[in-house]
Image (spheres, grey):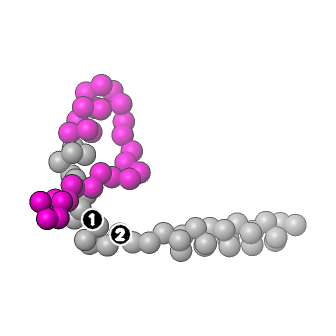
């Protein structure tokens, strides 16, 4: 029973670790660091801690106009 538990935990942990994809360099450059800093500063002033799950992306200009 213990062996089955250890194997299950090992397989699940290995599967979760392999599912994470490294962020590409282009995607990292698209993150709006200035906006994140303003939000973090305001949150700290109010005593709130922010954990960014999906960081904001920079706005892309509309094509053709």
The relative height of residue 10 versus residue 55 in the rendered view (above or below) is: below
Are dots 1 and 2 in contact, CB under 8 Å? yes
Q: Which residue is mark 2?
A: 23
Residue 6 % position (x, y): 75, 68
Does the magenta stretch mainly form a helix, a strand or a loop?
Answer: loop
Q: Residues within 10 Å of mark 1 (few under 14, many from 20)?
A: few
**Structural crowding at the residue carrying mark 2, measured as other residues with C-alpha within 10 Å and reported as few (<14), some (14–19) or many (≥20):** few
Q: Position of residue 37 (x, y in %)?
A: 21, 43
Residue 50: quarter of image: top left
User: Which residue is painted at 27% across and 55% down in the image?
Assistant: 57
For residue 13, which quarter of the picture?
bottom right
Quick one: SS at disc 2? Answer: loop
**Left or right, 63 with reference to 12:** left
- Region of the chain picked out in magenta, as a range: 38-65
Closer to the camera in the image, 28 or 65 = 65
Q: Position of residue 4 (x, y in %)?
A: 82, 70
Q: Is residue 5 magenta?
A: no
Q: CA distance from mark 1 to mark 2?
A: 7 Å
């Amino acid at each position: 029973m213990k062996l089955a538990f250890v194997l299950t935990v090992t397989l699940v942990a290995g599967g979760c670790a392999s599912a994470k994809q490294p962020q590409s360099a282009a995607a990292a450059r698209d993150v709006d660091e200035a906006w994140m800093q303003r939000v973090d500063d305001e949150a700290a002033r109010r005593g709130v801690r922010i954990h960014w799950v999906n960081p904001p992306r920079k706005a892309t200009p509309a094509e053709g106009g």
